[in-house]
Image (cartoon, helix red, strand yellow):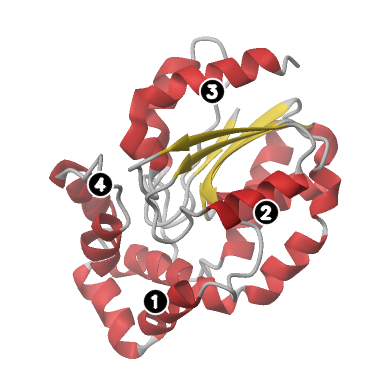
Amino acid sequence: MVFLHGNPTSARLYRHLLHGLAPDHRCIAPDYLGFGRSAAPQEFSYRPPAHATLVETLLRTLGVSDVTLVLHDWGGPIGLTYALRHPETIRRLILMNTWAWPLTHRPVLQAASRLLATPMGRIAVERFNAFTRLVMPATTGSASPLRPDWIQTYTAALDTPTRRLACWVFARALRKETQWLRALWTRRERLRDHPTLLCWGMDDPAFGHERCLQRWQRLFENIHVRRFPATGHYVPEEKGAALLKPVRQFLQSTPG
């Protein structure tokens, strides 16, 4: 099982799933450069395609096969880049509040990305960690308000300007990577036959709507959907160990 996180989190996002699944599964949960415990080299671009290239290199080096990809937020486009290049190595997909298409149809996301891409937006993220302090709480569901210790943990991890730059590049990429996302989505049919589980926070202001789910449902032949009302964007953090039951049921119903 390969777990890929988004912005501004790290592999820690999956700690509850990892704790419950690791005894029975080989679990690989990398931190992208600039996040978690990984290095933050100044010369790295931190753009999603660059992260995707490193993830592909890692998984090819490890020689993985029969993979279950677990993807959240930017982990979706990054992980599906690998899956589309190496579909023969993928057994299943587990998707949580993520996407793999251009977000041009989402004016709120476009406006937020445009604002964060301004010089003042960059200052807010790089100097004051505005993404973890403001965006994360604003996108958490009403049933599971983001606890102060969560915010503090992710804020503390972005402890240098370069790490906060990595966070800012992801925020800007919602607008800047439209061409890359469009190219990714045009190849989506290669994954149609892969069993897929959607674990979806329906109180996510960015992706918690039926139109987003329907895009995935139209793609996959064998799809299972678990909706979580009053759960926001950060599903693995908000639901924690409660995700183990639907994930285990899905794994058992789609044996390798």
First in sequence: mark 2 vs mark 1: 1
Q: Gap in Å between the C-alphas at discs 3 and 1?
A: 32 Å
Q: Is residue 166 above or below residue 65?
A: below
- The residue lying toward the viewer, choosing from 181 and 88, is 181
**Mark 3 lies on residue:** 247
Q: Residue at x 51, y 66 (%)?
A: 46
**Mark 4 lies on residue:** 142
First in sequence: mark 1 vs mark 4: 1
Q: Gap in Å between the C-alphas at discs 2 and 3?
A: 21 Å
Amino acid bearing label 3:
Val
The answer to whether residue 137 is visible is yes
**Mark 1 lies on residue:** 112
- Side (left or right) of 104 relative to 136: right
- Side (left or right) of 67 relative to 84: left
Query: Callout 3: 10 Å neighbours few (<14), some, many (20+)?
Result: some
Amino acid bearing label 1:
Ala
Q: Where on the picture, by quarter, is residue 178?
A: bottom right
Amino acid bearing label 2:
Arg
In the rendered structure, are the residues bearing label 4 and label 2 in contact, judged by CB atoms less than 8 Å apart?
no
Q: Is residue 45 above or below residue 92?
A: below
Q: Gap in Å between the C-alphas at discs 1 and 4?
A: 21 Å
